Amino acid sequence: MRPSKRAASDLRPVRFERAVSRHAEGSCLVRFGDTEVMCTASLEDRVPGWLRGGGKGWVTAEYGMLPRSTTERMRREASAGKPSGRTQEIQRLIGRSLRAVVDMHKLGERQITIDCDVLQADGGTRTASITGAWVALHDCVRWMQARDMVSEDPLIDHVAAVSCGVYGGETVLDLDYLEDSDAETDANFVMTGSGNLVEVQASAEGEPFTQDQLIEMLDLARAGIGQLVDLQKMTIG
Amino acid sequence: MRPSKRAASDLRPVRFERAVSRHAEGSCLVRFGDTEVMCTASLEDRVPGWLRGGGKGWVTAEYGMLPRSTTERMRREASAGKPSGRTQEIQRLIGRSLRAVVDMHKLGERQITIDCDVLQADGGTRTASITGAWVALHDCVRWMQARDMVSEDPLIDHVAAVSCGVYGGETVLDLDYLEDSDAETDANFVMTGSGNLVEVQASAEGEPFTQDQLIEMLDLARAGIGQLVDLQKMTIG
Amino acid sequence: MRPSKRAASDLRPVRFERAVSRHAEGSCLVRFGDTEVMCTASLEDRVPGWLRGGGKGWVTAEYGMLPRSTTERMRREASAGKPSGRTQEIQRLIGRSLRAVVDMHKLGERQITIDCDVLQADGGTRTASITGAWVALHDCVRWMQARDMVSEDPLIDHVAAVSCGVYGGETVLDLDYLEDSDAETDANFVMTGSGNLVEVQASAEGEPFTQDQLIEMLDLARAGIGQLVDLQKMTIG
Amino acid sequence: MRPSKRAASDLRPVRFERAVSRHAEGSCLVRFGDTEVMCTASLEDRVPGWLRGGGKGWVTAEYGMLPRSTTERMRREASAGKPSGRTQEIQRLIGRSLRAVVDMHKLGERQITIDCDVLQADGGTRTASITGAWVALHDCVRWMQARDMVSEDPLIDHVAAVSCGVYGGETVLDLDYLEDSDAETDANFVMTGSGNLVEVQASAEGEPFTQDQLIEMLDLARAGIGQLVDLQKMTIG
Amino acid sequence: MRPSKRAASDLRPVRFERAVSRHAEGSCLVRFGDTEVMCTASLEDRVPGWLRGGGKGWVTAEYGMLPRSTTERMRREASAGKPSGRTQEIQRLIGRSLRAVVDMHKLGERQITIDCDVLQADGGTRTASITGAWVALHDCVRWMQARDMVSEDPLIDHVAAVSCGVYGGETVLDLDYLEDSDAETDANFVMTGSGNLVEVQASAEGEPFTQDQLIEMLDLARAGIGQLVDLQKMTIG
Amino acid sequence: MRPSKRAASDLRPVRFERAVSRHAEGSCLVRFGDTEVMCTASLEDRVPGWLRGGGKGWVTAEYGMLPRSTTERMRREASAGKPSGRTQEIQRLIGRSLRAVVDMHKLGERQITIDCDVLQADGGTRTASITGAWVALHDCVRWMQARDMVSEDPLIDHVAAVSCGVYGGETVLDLDYLEDSDAETDANFVMTGSGNLVEVQASAEGEPFTQDQLIEMLDLARAGIGQLVDLQKMTIG
């Protein structure tokens, strides 16, 4: 039995709140249970140096946690002098995931930066970030379309993410912090709306895992991501 | 006429939302118009090295802005390698303001860290931070009292803050971003519930200002801070 | 009675020594009692990026303390990895104070950097810095005029600064280190030669202060700054 | 056809050279084709703070590349001021992989640090690092056993790693740099000698990939890692 | 008697291995006894800013040590946040030494960066670096000549280096780590193939040394460097 | 003919001013011509970690330049984020030079830190620093003796330093900035009062130099340092 009483294949309650920022071109406050992430999309008329002059755009992401988003207060990253390895790993994952569903030529020579700031953490902050970031990105693209900045829609597909784990010997979906702390294996899956894989990351925290367990987790993730994409569709509806 | 159409002595609408964080011992989301700051109080059972063994506690503050809390996206401070001078100046101001109304002996050898994170900025983030931080601090102290951690109330008084400025030659209260950008003089006042001054900071951005203008701003601030303290009282009611 | 035996409204002995640097375009060694600050003005034919092409100049300041300028040796800032928050706060104050009396259009597209390096500290290093920096700035402007680099004098007025405090319940002028350490309230005032205010900073270190005490300090500061401006005039005479 | 002319399921020539360092307790120079990594194991009689007093040991890893290990010279990380996100990600992967096959209780309160320094890079540096690091770790454990420092063997199993990818639409094993640069999907697999999974990381660089492709890559990796473990066994034979 | 049993004027066995890097334009693995340094030369078609447009080239060097190149594992410099003072001192010494034998006009507006990475340290890493770096530089220049990139040979002369010391009261050549740790005086000499001096650095670690001892060390160094240059000639033969 | 019109063996006018700091245990403002360095000695009752409990003391040095001590304003090191390689090299040289004339056992478990801050630079700042630092160190030791903190004098001998160079083909003593910029070879010599060598550093900036030139410079330096030691004796006399 999971601490959260959920069935193995249950997502936590998921909610999206759009247009939560007065300044950003697109924004979304996403909640996966008690995990809350503020996602904003910022549009700029310039691209990184290595892309300049090629007519292609870029989508990148940054990630942060408020110091008391966690059970124990963490040190503020600005005081630590640099983003931690974990932070850099997550922001590169979010960026790769979003770029998989954007046509950079149609975007034109512009950059969209997605900021994912965790207001409250209860496990799954990176998967909530990717899933909410897609909504902010979508709204930013609509903002551009409303201003005739792009002639064709650069957004190819949905993208969403969910975690799975081996907990108490059983494969389960969408771990909260309590489950995550005790899981033997921790995995994150990123998929498109059409069901293809963008990223698979599975790590044994304790015992190595079997290929069968990996397949089971893939199946759980596929179902969960299907529901997340449906929720994204209702949100932007 | 102010861009915000307010009278010279009008505050923006001010709202406090308590208990917005599941993890923090006290928390408050404060809004001064479109300025939104998340304030959390984190209690720790240790004090800075130079206080150890003296039986006294400490209250300190940290301040940050989400990258897209501003009109143009700012660089994330964790990427910049260190908190900017402005950030450090503000967090020391918040800390000093709160310490002015706490009896450190009654707090005992513990530290309360107040994090003020700006979710959306529209001028006056430091004054909103101080005013909201007091509510988070208050709730943290009540949390401690509920657990019999302190025998006497360490909270001596309210503290609140507001900005004033010379705008179009006239002294006005609680500047928003648009007014702040054009003000000739920018001032911040911090006062206790009993009406004494904790901090006065007034800076000529363009023309120097007169002593009469300083007195006028003091009078505006006194009235505004009185209203903020009344709102704090209703909030903790 | 003040530890320094001075009356409440007495400045310490103030001295200016000009042309103390062989290399700088203007320089001044200023002493407020035992506080000694070396001020140099460095002229450059370029302005910060955001001013380029606008025909306007810029004045900025940097501040430092020699490691053993203080009673106990301090850590060298170059070893600490970055200027402290206090250092940044002071250098921005000096810069703002000087810019209040310079016409940036008349200066032309050039930058003057004022370095204020504390050789010996005994309280009031920031106010001595501002007061001495004006002399270095003045001499730099004269150096430019002697070379026909400016057609009209960009220096509009004098600027000088002094500290005040509430010490033993009484308001006093120009605190030395011993007084400063024990003062309940610490304030710094920056005024122009014509008596207008450029900056007011007053902080309660212990007890909050009253509006009457603030007015008393303002009156003390006005008289003290008047004397400092007279001394500046005699120096450049 | 692969640029390297290899069949889809072919490893590059793999060689291990033991005892290449005079100072280290264990060391191995590993080559996967033209990729060369120097792995050293350093034993210390202390563990990280959070493990102290618990009787358990720790295994950690650091990773670096010589500036000219790559086609174009890279900036030296010591000059860059901090290890890059990629470096941190890799060193955490190596550490996790090794810890999966060590019994920390049997190791006792000691730390083994594995340094993996890339002398020459031609793709697959992280998988070569893990595979060679196991040999250095093994020799360090034997060094301890020879000195009666452990009563039972803390090394539970072999661990090895290999990359796979989708290249020209086909799944292939052990990509070199040329193949890696053009692959649509890039994956790394870490498995134990008994065939269980420690880590799966698969990323779409261009097109998302299907579940079938993931399974095919898993099968290739399983066969390749089997061969690598056989080579490890012959090396330590 | 020296711990290494060598006569006072004996070098350790010296070996050069060329073309050890697949990517670099020139490379050399040099061994002075158990000291091993990998030297690579990297050619770039740009020079530092202050040289641009002058038609002259530049030669610079960087130096590093693998963490376990030493008896006790050292902290990785990338983690330490910056190259140490010792590292900077050594890389400037290597750069100056090589530039003394290169005609920058004949090199043309290009930069050659020599990386010297210590794989194993047993004293004399800086002198081995200079001596091996010359071979890598030589091979890089030949690489350029083979591609008709220079019309005249920019390499003017050989350069090599050796350490000397006062050990047990006696002057000795080419100290290993054991001798170096106990030497009263430690000196490094850099000379050209024609016998002129490029650099002399002699430091008393304990007792000051006499002018006679300096002359004796100079004579030992002259003979040793003569042998090193002969070995360089045989290597490039 | 030298730009300074001095004969080859002439020092610049040298002056020492003692007790220039109110706070330091010893201090000296030293001038070598237009080069001015403020040297302070700071006594602390603790030693670096690796010396603790051994009954021995330590002498260390730090060095800095005021930003406008030079012809062109330099960047402030505190802003640059770390002391430059040159700064670190100089402060280690000053420290080694002073330690050569101090008996660490007689000093007891205390540390003396010498700060050398260049107020004005005109060549030879490191040699002026060493020579002036000895006076500050001497006065610090006398301060300790006056308080019966040491039973025997820990100061064994004088130490002083001077530069030499090959300028226009001729060896000359004590180069000023103009000479230093054009010298083919630049050398620094540190000697004790009894005429032994503590440090020799000679670098070819252009043409390599001969052994004869090195000997000539040694002879010039010996005579110059003799005069500097005489001046130190008169100063403390």
Image (spheres, coloured by chain):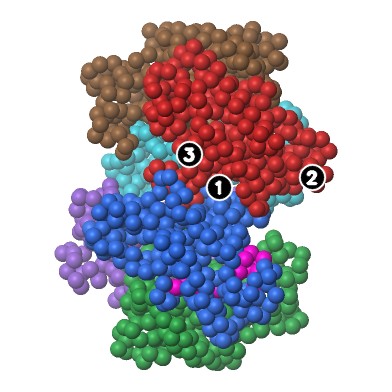
Chain colours: A red, B blue, C green, D brown, E cyan, F purple
Magenta-colored span: B174-192
Determine the secondary structure under disc 2.
helix
- In the image, residue B175 lies in the stretch drawn in magenta: yes
Mark nearer the viewer, 3 or 1: 3
Residue wearing tag 2: A146
- How busy is the neighbourhood of tag 3: few (under 14 within 10 Å), some, or many (20 plus)? some
Which chain hosts label 1?
B
Front-lying residue, D211 or C55: D211
Residue C87 inside the magenta-drawn segment: no
Q: What residue sits 47% from the left and 78% below the top? A: C188
Task: Indicate the position of residue F100 as horizontal and vertical percent values.
Answer: 31, 56
| Mark 3 and mark 2: Cα distance apart in space | 34 Å
x, y percentage for residue C83?
A: 48, 61
Residue carrying label 3:
A34
- Is the residue at mark 3 from the same chain as the one at mark 2? yes
Q: Is residue A80 visible?
A: no
Looking at the rendered structure, the secondary structure element under dot 1 is helix
Horizontally, residue E43 falls left or right of residue D38, namely right
Residue count near mark 1 (Cα–Cα under 10 Å), binned few <14, some 14–19, many ≥20: some
Question: Residue at point 60% right, 27% down?
Answer: A227
Q: Is residue D86 above or below residue A139?
A: above
* SS at mark 3 in the image: loop
Query: To which residue does mark 1 refer?
Result: B79
